[in-house]
Image: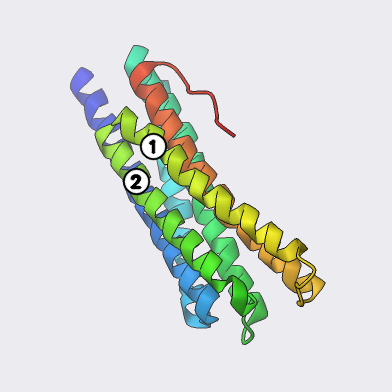
Amino acid sequence: MRVVLNERLSELGGILGEMVSMAGSLMEQATQSLLQADLAVAETVITEYDKLAILSHRGEERAMSLLARQAPVATDLRSVISAIQIVADIERMGALALHVAQATRRRHPNHVLPEEVNGYFSEMGKIAVGLAAQAKEVLETRNTELAARLSEEDDAMDDLHNHLFTLMMDREWKHSAAEAVDVALLGRYYERFADHAVEVGRRVIFLVTGHLPIPTD
């Protein structure tokens, strides 16, 4: 029974790692489509998201099956509970990348963003992809110090997000209300992507220590 449980937990961990890697790749491609108004790349993201949704369903099913059939306790129980919550967080990361790609498709052949904010979103995209890669490493190593550092990278994302609003509120903002709405929404997608990556780290800390860190936001 113990050997089977360990094998199932390992399989579940593999699914989580594959999911977060896929979410990072989706956001990387979504950012490319956004900055370049590249419809083909946006369509790829929209199609590939379905694969992430399938993995999410599989991970949730595996976790529920472990609860029902293996009756895990202590650390094993925390692993399964954390996995269920992590699946939801990673699926949401993928959904946010999907929203970015859908914005590209909706405005094509025009660019969604005014040129002066491209640098902000380029940097936000890099941070998002980096957070996904770091979350994957945290899932594989269960390194609680690395997990805690996810929130530091999230601070950089929050700063960029706040600067976007400062820019839009400036009297020299010369773009339309529709463009301002697009910028605000897209900024929120990246900010929330980072928040969910931080949540993955918090769940890993809970898995290892039995204590869930208080959110810093």
* Residue on which disc 2 sits: 134
Position in image of residue 144 (x %, y %): 33, 28
Above/below status of 180 relative to 36: above
Asked if marks 1 and 2 touch (Cβ < 8 Å), the reply is yes
Please name the amino acid that badge 1 sits on.
Arg
Asked which quadrant contains residue 116, the reply is bottom right
Depth-wise, is mark 1 or mark 2 nearer the camera? Answer: 1
Farthest residue in the left direction? 3
Position in image of residue 178 (x %, y %): 78, 72
> Residue at image x 55%, y 69%?
101
Q: Nearer the viewer, residue 182 or 47?
A: 182
Secondary structure of residue under mark 1: helix
* Quarter of the figure with the N terminus: top left
Above/below status of 176 relative to 50: below
* Residue on which disc 1 sits: 149
Please name the amino acid that badge 2 sits on.
Gln
